[in-house]
Every structure is written in structure tokens, then in C-alpha cells.
Amino acid sequence: MVVFAGQGDARRSLSLLWRAEVAAPPRTAPGPKPRLSVDAIVAAAIAVADEEGMAALSMRAVGDRLGRTAMALYTHVPGKSELLDLMYDAVHAELPTSYPESDDWRAPLTAWAGEVLELYVRHPWVLQVSQARPVLGPHEYANLDTLVRLLGATGLEAGTVRRLVGTLFPLVQGSARTVADARRAATATGSSDEEWWAARSAALTELVPDFAERFPAVIRLEREAAPEPYRTHDDQDAMPYPEREARETFRVGLGVLLDGIEAARAGRS
């Protein structure tokens, strides 16, 4: 399921994102002040998407979470399209915008990539928002500005930095998507990773007895680069194979990319 941002009214959406609306006149009528606000609606919508997924997101679902009707929300947010833009931008406020100064440009770039990966894993619905059309919100721009500054420390020319921005985001997003999918696969399908692989490995061995002869490079890679057991930080439970592989692929892929940046720097000098 791919969702495109920026489908609401452009001026209204950007006004809400940047909180640039003209202030409302002071209330003169008696009675309590409204309990709802844009921030409260956005926070409730993020909670719905985090817990139930993008498919469950609706103005009614958000209203139910707040104990209000969907119609009450429209006073603050015009519709679901504008709400999605606000949600997407809001979660990016969780990302750091500065890193300790260091002569080692690799360290902050590695830290930035790790922070963005964990953001996507915490909010997997963000990965369904297409990058073809950006939200253009302040927190999205702050994250982009941070990355550009970190890449600027490499000394590479602006054109190369621009393309590296377009390379780093897909790398992080792809790894995060695999981690997020790995975490929900068992619940979504009703079978564990072990059950899934056991059933298909047995069937593949029976149905394709010449598999090793047909795909020798794959077999050789599996034999020479068999993954090591992975433990979580508290060393209690083994991390599921797909998530372990996604995180290791992310670590190695990012390292090779940074090596490439180092090589480009050396060639430039």
C-alpha cells in the first residue's frame, strides 16, 4: 500500500504544517474552551497508525480515540490527506538535528542513519508514504538539512552531496522496511519464520533435487558466508533471522557506502 502525500489543499496543508495560520479571534461566548487541537489530533492519529497500521487510519478512528466525533476534527484538520502530511512531519521531530563536533565525518553520518532507521521501525506506516512527493514540512526539512550538513563535512562537491542524499534515504528505508515486515510477518500470516522456512526447504529439496547444480553461486555464498547467531543487547533472546539479516545488511551496506565516500574524497584531493 503506497500513499502519496500532499493530496490536500496546498495552502491549507502548508499552513497547518508550518503553523502559519492567522490567529483566531479571542472567544467571547461563555463555556469551556475546546479540548481539541491540531497537535492532539495528530498525536492520536499517529497512535492509531502505529498500533493498527495505515489501513486503519480514518478521521472516525482518530475521533474515537479522542472521544469525539469525526466531524469535530474537521474544525482543526480539513481531512485525512492533510492529516497524513501532519503525521508524517510530526514523527520526524523525534530525530536529532545536531551531532557532537568531530573530525571523523563517518561517526555522525553513521549515527544519523541509525536514528532514521529506528524512527521508521517505530513508525512503519511512514514507509508507505511515497518519496515521489515530499510533505514539505519543517521537521522533514530539518532532517534533510541535518543530513546535508553532515555530508557537507566530507568536502565533496554539491552535486555529489545531492546524489548521496538520494542514495542514503533508500538504503535506510529498505532496511527498515525489512525489519518492520519481519516483526509483523508471524502475526500477519499465522506461521513463524521457523515454520515457514522448514516447510519450504523440505518442499524445495524434494521438488528441485538439482537446486545446487542450477544455482551454484547462491549455494557457495550460503556456505562461505553463513550468518552467525545474533543476540540482543541483553543477550536473552535471539533476534529473528529476517530482522538480523536486515540490520546486518544495513550495517555492511552503509559501511561500504561510507568507504565509497572516503574514496571519492581521496580522489578529489
Image: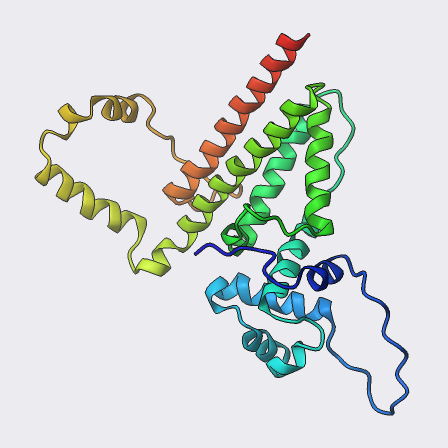
* Rendering coords of residue 201 (x, y %): 19, 41
The answer, for residue 53, to whether it is visible in the render is no
Residue found at x 51% / y 64%: 51
Q: Relative to 133, is 227 above or below?
A: above
Residue found at x 87% / y 90%: 29
* Rendering coords of residue 142 (x, y %): 73, 44
Quadrant in which the N terminus appears: bottom left
Residue found at x 67% / y 59%: 10
Residue 165 in which image quadrant = top right
Q: Relative to 34, is 150 above or below?
A: above
Q: Is 207 situated left or right of 28 in this image?
A: left
Q: How many marks?
A: 0
Residue found at x 66% / y 66%: 42
Colour pattern of the rendering = rainbow
* Rendering coords of residue 81 (x, y %): 59, 64
Q: Relative to 79, is 245 above or below?
A: above
* Rendering coords of residue 85 (x, y %): 63, 58
Residue 239 in which image quadrant = top left
Quadrant in which the C terminus appears: top right
| Of residues 233 and 172, the one drawn nearer to the viewer in this rendering | 172
Q: Relative to 150, is 134 above or below?
A: below
| Of residues 190 and 157, the one drawn nearer to the viewer in this rendering | 157
The answer, for residue 209, to whether it is visible in the render is yes
| Of residues 221 and 40, the one drawn nearer to the viewer in this rendering | 40
| Of residues 66 and 23, the one drawn nearer to the viewer in this rendering | 23
